[in-house]
């Protein structure tokens, strides 16, 4: 489990917009160790990002924007980086960070978190989960635990009520890489090693471990 030393809550400070201007694959790794925070009328809940997946736009068959597909759902990805891209899958809301330059529709899915603050709130929201690990060890689970919804679509991640803070730097040697999950029928894209996670962290997706 990651341990953070915080004084006067510096972890609450949003990352500056410039952080999101990194190339998508680099940003997907840089997000590991950062803290995703959501404030609602019920309180603040947050988690340390421990697993991400990069989606590389028009040339990535697994991306929603493959082939330059521009729809009401994908429109936000064509804008500036550092914006929230949420979408529904089955009954779940998934949270992505828009990346890439303007007009280059990339995004990074946050797949798993390590609970950091607001654990009582997470426990209520994920009451059917068997244990703390299952609160946030999947993209739909973490959105439910933090209170992220489709209403967050298009929200800039340097502002309340949904933002990302610096957290803890993760050394390159502690970052594992592998194929993305749940993208069958996407041809060669199923093999791209564009999923990143913190090695040995118990909160990453079960298939990753």
Image (cartoon, grey):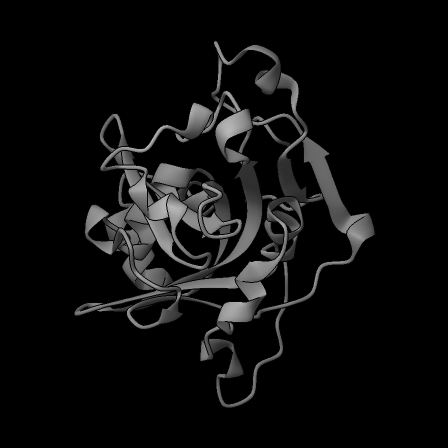
Q: Is residue 79 left or right of residue 30?
A: left
| Closer to the camera in the image, 62 or 41 | 62
Above or below for 158 versus 96: below
Residue 202: % across, % down? 60, 43
Residue 151: % across, % down? 19, 52
For the N terminus, the image quarter is: bottom right
| Closer to the camera in the image, 1 or 66 | 66
Residue 43: % across, % down? 25, 71
What residue is rendered at 53% in x and 54% in y?
A: 49
Residue 160: % across, % down? 31, 72
What residue is rendered at 54% in x and 26% in y?
A: 60
Q: Is residue 106 left or right of residue 76?
A: right
The image quarter in which residue 170 lies:
bottom right
Q: Residue furthest right?
A: 173
Q: Is residue 185 left or right of residue 33?
A: left
| Closer to the camera in the image, 166 or 157 | 157
Marks counted in the figure total 0
The image quarter in which residue 180 lies:
top right
Residue 1 visible, this orientation = no
What residue is rendered at 64% in x and 44% in y?
A: 25
What residue is rendered at 50% in x and 20% in y?
A: 61
For the C terminus, the image quarter is: top right
């Amino acid at each position: 489990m990651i341990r953070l030393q915080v004084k006067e809550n510096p972890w609450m400070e949003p990352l500056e917009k410039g952080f999101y201007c990194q190339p998508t694959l680099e940003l997907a790794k840089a997000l590991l160790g950062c803290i995703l925070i959501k404030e609602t009328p019920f309180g603040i809940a947050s988690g340390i990002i421990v697993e991400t997946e990069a989606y590389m736009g028009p040339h990535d068959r697994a991306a929603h924007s493959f082939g330059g597909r521009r729809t009401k759902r994908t429109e936000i990805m064509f804008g500036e980086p550092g914006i929230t891209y949420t979408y529904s899958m089955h009954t779940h809301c998934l949270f992505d960070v828009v990346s890439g330059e303007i007009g280059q529709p990339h995004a990074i899915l946050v797949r798993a978190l390590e609970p950091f603050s607001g654990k009582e709130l997470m426990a209520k929201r994920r009451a059917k989960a068997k244990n703390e690990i299952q609160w946030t060890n999947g993209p739909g689970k973490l959105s439910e635990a933090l209170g992220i919804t489709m209403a967050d679509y298009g929200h800039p991640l340097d502002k309340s009520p949904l933002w990302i803070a610096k957290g803890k730097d993760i050394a390159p040697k502690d970052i594992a890489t592998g194929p993305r999950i749940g993208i069958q029928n996407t041809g060669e894209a199923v093999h791209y090693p564009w999923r990143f996670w913190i090695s040995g962290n118990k909160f990453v997706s079960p298939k990753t471990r």
